[in-house]
Image (cartoon, grey):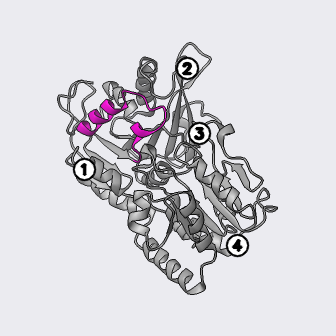
Amino acid sequence: MMGLDHPSKAPGGEGMTEALLVFSHLRWNFVFQRPQHLLSRLASARRVIFFEEPVAGEHAEAFIQYSSPETSVLVCKPHTPSPKPGFHDEQLPHLMEPVKVMLRDLNLKDYILWFYTPMALPLVKVLDPRGIVYDCMDELSAFMDAPPQLIQLESDLLNLADIVFTGGPSLYRAKKDRNPNVHCFPSSVDRAHFSCSRTRPVEPHNQREIPHPRLGYFGVLDERLDLALLNALALAHPEWQIVMIGPVVKIDENKLPKHDNIHYLGQQQYVDLPHYLASWDLCLLPFALNNATRFISPTKTLEYMSAEKQIVTTPITDVAEPYREIVFLGNDAQSFISACETALALKVPEKKRRIAAMREVLSRTSWDRTVDAMNDILLTIFEPQPRRKGGQGVPHGRSGGLNL
């Protein structure tokens, strides 16, 4: 996607005075997930400025590259001379001035800060928002290579935020006593998008020659996957074809189990996922049980359900607790393999019962409903009010006295 010469040339957002300035550790063009689902919908009523992690540039001066992937969504990709990853301490001095220039260029005067990563919190020093939202979609401190200062910065953000959203019930339980305004909004689903897989769309070319039965997974391939389980699954049933879709992140690709019946198809576009899903005989959630998965609430669970596929999962809390009567659970490699065998041999009456339960779950949730409910909270907390006079760095909300 080409960068815009100037942010004022970005399409959409005309006439919108309020904005969300979002700081994210995930890139907009990465796996399409919670941030993109929420923000593309929130952008119908306000401008969304999506500020990504810096990338190392070849110029001595930092600058911001702009692009507009969605109407009223402007993606800001900062380029700095520092090679440090993410919103590293070494990156922050390079970002302060470009952020101020961005505010001026975009004429951003009435905006709410929305954080996906606490690592960007020090940038609030040069900002003057109406308030702060923290959408806590993961326990980032438990992930591989997490920066040591992340825990303290998240504590500061929880103290500062006017609103905290959590991406699932286990995260809600972990954060609910650390801020007076915490709301649980589990990841939802675009049911129409994934239910079209039931109409048997055109088979993707790189999957056509893979025999059945097909056991599939889509999502990021990282330290959250149980690679030993995946290896055991492939060895136990060489006739099963395991389809893995998604980018490999933070782990050595050479450590992925390699067998003739495991097919790594790489990252695919969100729009194409139902085409892959359509011909899978079983959907997998082969997560390891470790610190990185303790609080996850996989978006793909409901996406699999929208396709009305049987699901086999390890006992991740936010899947096992609400859906244990719908999914098949396997605690270890052997029980996971047994669960797959049972799911593939499922009789029609039991399959119909589980599908009916899936439909009931899906009838209660959608990304549109989630955004409507979030909007109600935003409007309650951030009612229009006169701008305060004075310096920058302290928003209108709960942040008084925080020394960043």
Q: Which residue is mark 2?
A: 83
Give me the residue at 66% from left, 70% from top: 281
| Residue 136: image location, x then y, percent | 37, 46
Q: Is residue 22 visible?
A: no
- In front of the other: label 4 or label 1? 1
Tags 1 and 2 touching, CB below 8 Å: no
User: Mark 4 Cα within 10 Å, few/some/many (few <14, many 20+)?
Assistant: few
Tags 1 and 3 touching, CB below 8 Å: no
- In front of the other: label 3 or label 4? 3
Q: Which residue is mark 4?
A: 200
Give me the residue at 42% from left, 17% from top: 93
Q: Which mark is residue 138?
A: none
Estimate the spatial distance between the alpha carbons at disc 1 and disc 3, rounded to whole Å: 30 Å
Give, as a three-letter code, the residue at label 1: Lys
Estimate the spatial distance between the alpha carbons at disc 2 and disc 4, rounded to whole Å: 46 Å
Tags 3 and 2 touching, CB below 8 Å: no
Q: Which residues are magenta?
A: 137-160
Q: Which residue is mark 3?
A: 249
Residue at the far left: name it: 401
Q: Which mark is residue 176?
A: 1
Of 273 and 391, nearer the camera is: 273
User: Mark 2 Cα within 10 Å, few/some/many (few <14, many 20+)?
Assistant: some
Estimate the spatial distance between the alpha carbons at disc 3 and disc 2, rounded to whole Å: 18 Å
SS label for mark 1 = loop
User: Mark 1 Cα within 10 Å, few/some/many (few <14, many 20+)?
Assistant: some
| Residue 88: image location, x then y, percent | 44, 24
SS label for mark 4 = loop
Q: Quadrant of the C terminus?
A: top left
Residue at the far right: name it: 209
Direction from residue 85 to residue 58 in the image, left or right = right
Of 195 and 339, nearer the camera is: 339
The answer to which of marks 2 and 4 sits earlier in the sequence is 2
